[in-house]
Amino acid sequence: MEGASRRSGLSSVESEERFRQIFFTHLESDGFSEADAYRLIFKTPDPFHRAPTGLHGLDLLRSFRESYQRQLPYSWYFEGLNRKPESDRRCLQAPERPVTFVVIPGIFGEFIQPVPFQSVVDRKDSHFSRKWQASLEATPDRVYSLLELSEVPCSLAEVVKIGSLDQAERSFANVIILRARSGSLESLGTLASNVDVYERRLTKIFEVIAEDTDIYIIGYSRGLPVALELVSRLHEQMKSGVISPATQAWFEKVRGVVGLGGVFYGANFAHDVLTGQSATSQLLRLLSETSAKLTPLPKDAAKKSLFLAENARTWAHFVKGISGAGPPKVAAGRTFLQMDLHEMFARESKTRILDRDVPPPSQWGIFALVNTFLLNSFNLRQLVSRYNENIQAFQKLVEAVMAGLDTLTPESRDAWWRSHELPKDLVLFSLTGTMPEAYLDDYESPLSRFAGFGVKTSDYNVSLRASYYDVLSSENTLINDSQMSHYCSRYWEEMHPEHSYAHHYLGVLGTHHWGMAFPFAIKDVARVGVNSFPRSTLLKSMASFISSL
């Protein structure tokens, strides 16, 4: 890691400590206690700032699995406990010239009600919003509609949310969030199909928003591979001289890409899902089988009844499958350090039932959320009026889901890094997270009640806690945020030495994958609260870190 870090002026250890100092300072300014700060950002032990072997690519990932498996999230919290960095009050002053963050959402982002960093764009009185919101509302754009099977008109304001992090008359950062509308397939499909949309949309955005600021693209989760694909494509266009003047005007302002829980090197969990080794695999198998069996009705009236009957049986099997299937077994048949993961999950559930303070987690994990996505995006009520269109929409959705998951596998990411180039002066940043460790024997993690995890929320209990165990079974590490392992969501120069870039490692947050970006992903009908992780403070700290370089 040290080669890329030296070029950026700070080592991996120094970058993390610098960001930790800035985050602590902003947390204190925003009213958080010192105890809160230790719980909201942990400290990476020194050995985990370096690759464990001299291997590369997928071989190095296997080495990471071996080196990480005995690490506890609590030990990473304890590493920083009572090691308070000295406050740097300079970072509390907004710079004369703010940076502009462009946030690209993750997979299935179009089916999550809030957008990333919702609280920032909710402030309609922010400097950035007051200046440019009306222009976005007046600018026409277009967005794909799965139900219409074509692009439909919209305003730019419907697919772009903006705000700023203000201090008096200045701002730490302008924030542009690319909102993927439900059924747009902008958070699914291939990277190329996503970039086709975002390249065009960003060019239009920056024709409307004429700010003279440096641009940093924040790739949240799968948004990181999309961001890297976008930058790589435009870099190649620049080299070939085929980039449009309007696109070149904003692309020349791009200074870096931030991976927030980002998929730098893939998620083995996605590999397991696609290869039938995960509980979620049964849902994908049902989707694929249903898609293959459905047939649009022909014009020949004599054949219609036959196809209608066969399609009806297929639909009935599908609906029964997603609504009546028994809960899948968490990490079925998997062990970790000779401990059965399903038994560990059951032990945690029992502890919670006896505690009576927090609800026991569901076994459904990501399976439950994907079911909700399907029901929200696919309108069975229009089966008669739009019969063939519904079949085509379903088949297109399944194709996009499968293609989107494929972009997340370690094999897919390894192939991408070996075949793509980024601008030499681009700076990469990575920021990761972790959930509390699993319950081992009768040991309850001291982290389990930390506010940043939102242990009473639906996100945690309906989906992410079971997903944490599934990721643990795939990655062999307790240091995971419920969807990404730590070592796969930060940049390592050693992974692909032929393509090494300046990089700043910012550290590991005390929250899960969704808590980094959302107050909630699953709407909480029980009203037991939202994840309280301070996302606005996080963005301010990122802006202050960049301004300090």
Image (spheres, rainbow, N blue to C red):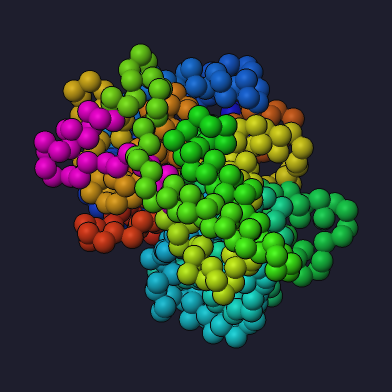
- Percent across and percent down for residue 518 are 39, 56
* Camera sees residue 227: no
* Camera sees residue 142: yes
Q: Main secondary structure of the magenta part?
A: helix
Write down the quadrant of residue 274 in the picture.
Answer: top right
Q: Residue at x 38, y 19 (%)?
A: 336
- Percent across and percent down for residue 132 are 55, 79
- Percent across and percent down for residue 376 are 45, 62
Q: Residue at x 70, y 38 (%)?
A: 416
Q: Nearer the viewer, residue 478 or 452?
A: 478
- Percent across and percent down for residue 108 are 51, 54
Please check the rendered image and state whether residue 285 is part of the magenta-colored stretch, yes or no. no
Write down the quadrant of residue 249 in the picture.
Answer: bottom right
Where is 385 relative to 483, above or below?
Answer: below
Callout count = 0
Q: Which residues are magenta?
A: 345-371
Q: Quadrant of the N terminus?
A: top right
Where is 82 relative to 509, above or below?
Answer: above
Q: Nearer the viewer, residue 386 or 403?
A: 386
> Which residue sits furthest top?
338
